Amino acid sequence: MVTKLKCSYSTINPDELMAKVIPEYSIDTPLECLFFERGANDTYQVRCANASYFLRVYRHGAFPREANEFEAEALNYLHQKGFPVAYPIARRSGGYLTEIMAPEGLRLVLLTSLAKGTTPDYDSPEICRLVGQSVAQMHSTSSGFTTSHQRIRLDLQGLLENSMMDIQSYMAHRPDALHTIEEIAQEVRTAVQAVPEESLDIGICHGDLHGGNLHVQDGKVTHFDFEECAVGYRVYDLATFKWGECIGSDERRAIRWPVFLEGYESIRPISESEHSLIDFFVIIRELAETAYGIRHVLDFGHNGIMSSDIDHVCLRLNKLLDSTK
């Protein structure tokens, strides 16, 4: 028998969370903890008599603690300002994050309220417009947020340059494909650097606004899953929505995107520079998502990341670049 093998990723037993972690939080007596979903992090549903919550167990090493503290404070700020988010629940002893020691090492836990409603039906123009308005309201509401906690910004360095370092390392054995990707990245870099930075709206971004991280109920949009939130170019949030809900189908792009953007600009108009860069930031999102899978290959497996099919990555990037012309 081989013993003492190292573990890169474990699943925490819900009973252990129920007994040792959930009592740390200021909620009514919990009745049940269920392993709900495996994704970028592990999510558990915590059910009490009159309320339900979601408990997130961050992957070991996914973010420095500073980044998670930033997220919790940003969520709490939006909640205190009256903007609907899945807000953090405080620990009885103070703060929001709980440290647990998993087989692979330290992991952090955050408990949040439940985002009521269901995933939006983006085939409905009314819903697309409503979501666009909600994103604009989020950007406006978060403008006064300040914190002492630091995390990587969603700018060219944080989004493009850092992503390219991961991609270059992973694809070194395919110099032909890597050359194609580097050329596309350079076109994007040149386009963004050609506009004055002061023409770009900078502030708190959701960071993962692909269209699925929000629920709608009775005309109210509630946002959740802010684990990628940071200060950065807000046009990236808009481009991420376009990447997630409008790319891949000419019909979806023609119907969903204009209505979403119309809703956004009815509350928060964007500059001409931002209009001109949206499709370039869609490419940046594609590169960032490719790099994300590479960084988490031990969690998702090589077959579970976008970059496993390098030729397909190049094909998608070339199609996205064509849309900028």
Image (cartoon, helix red, strand yellow):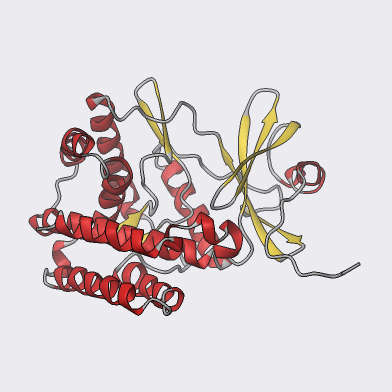
Q: Residue at x 33, y 75 (%)?
A: 178
Can residue 146 be spotted in the picture?
A: no
Left or right of 284? Residue 229 is right
Query: Does residue 31 sit above or below 178 in this rendering?
Result: above
Q: 62 and 28: which one is in front?
A: 62
Left or right of 178? Residue 60 is right
Q: Residue at x 80, y 41 (%)?
A: 15
- Quarter of the figure that contains the C terminus: bottom left
Q: 279 and 147: which one is in front?
A: 279
Q: Position of residue 204 (x, y in %)?
A: 35, 56
Query: Does residue 7 sit above or below 175 in this rendering?
Result: above
Query: Does residue 314 sit above or below 133 in this rendering?
Result: below
Looking at the image, the residue that sits furthest to the right is 1
- Quarter of the figure that contains the N terminus: bottom right
Q: Residue at x 13, y 57 (%)?
A: 324
Query: Does residue 3 sit above or below 75 in this rendering?
Result: below
Looking at the image, the residue that sits furthest to the top is 218
Can residue 193 be spotted in the picture?
A: yes
Count of numbered circles on the image: 0
Q: Position of residue 101 (x, y in %)?
A: 76, 62
Q: Residue at x 32, y 72 (%)?
A: 177
Q: Position of residue 284 (x, y in %)?
A: 29, 62
Q: Position of residue 247 (x, y in %)?
A: 26, 45
**Residue 185: quarter of image:** bottom left
